[in-house]
Amino acid sequence: MAEYLFETDRTRVRRLTLADKDAVFALLSDPEVMRYVDDDQPKTRAQSDAYLERHLSHYETYGYGQFAVEDIESGAVIGLVGLVPPSTHGADVEIGYTLDKAVWGRGIGREVASAVLAWGITTFGFTSVVATVDPQNIASARIALGLGFTYERFELDEYVLPTDVYILRVGRGTPE
């Protein structure tokens, strides 16, 4: 039985395992799901496997990474949510999530993002969190603002794609 890091009203969140290869690939290879993620391109099996290995390594190095989001009712993996070391944004950590399009528009993104923020702040004492959002991804921008993030700036990301940078400073809008 999996050990869950935390639960929300509709989901359970746990560390990824090698047994999640197919579920991770199903998410990361879907062009619609990946439209605003990384380089906006679906991932190949090799890229998806490398993603999984990277986050398994992050657990050992940092104690956190991207995690599997399971639907409580079905037990199916419906997405990924987690925290990763930020590259150049001047925050303690970066939040990220990717959800199966079958659950879009149901508030699950906000639910799991809020929960992973609370978990990270409580567990690791983070005082600042960054969210990078494609300017066309209105849903993710709304989630960031709704969780208390503040718009900081526009920049080009490592793929030279437009990115809005939001920052949450603990004490000035902590998650619910």
Image (cartoon, helix red, strand yellow):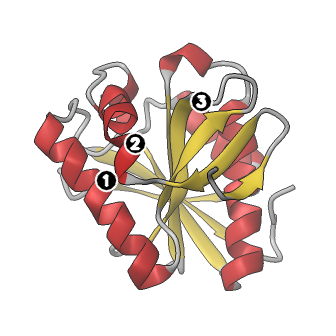
* Type of amino acid at the residue the image marks with label 2: Asp
Binning the other alpha carbons within 10 Å of mark 1 as few (below 14), some (14 to 19) or many (20 upward) gives many
Residue 144 vs 129, above or below: the answer is: above
Q: How many labels does the image show?
A: 3
Q: Looking at this view, is 44 or 70 the one in front?
A: 70
Label 1 vs 3, first from the N-terminus: 1
Residue 150 occupies quadrant: bottom right
Label 2 vs 3, first from the N-terminus: 2
In three-dimensional space, the C-alpha distance between marks 2 and 3, rounded to whole angstroms, equals 26 Å
* Type of amino acid at the residue the image marks with label 3: Ala
Q: Which residue is drawn at 66% across and 58% down?
A: 3
From the image, which quarter does the C terminus lie in? bottom right
In three-dimensional space, the C-alpha distance between marks 2 and 1, rounded to whole angstroms, equals 8 Å
Q: Looking at this view, is 29 or 87 the one in front?
A: 29
SS class, disc 3: helix
As drawn, the label of residue 52 is 1
Q: Would you name the residue on which mark 3 appears?
A: 139
* Type of amino acid at the residue the image marks with label 1: Leu
Binning the other alpha carbons within 10 Å of mark 2 as few (below 14), some (14 to 19) or many (20 upward) gives some
Q: Would you name the residue on which mark 2 appears?
A: 20
Q: Residue at x 53, y 33 (%)?
A: 77
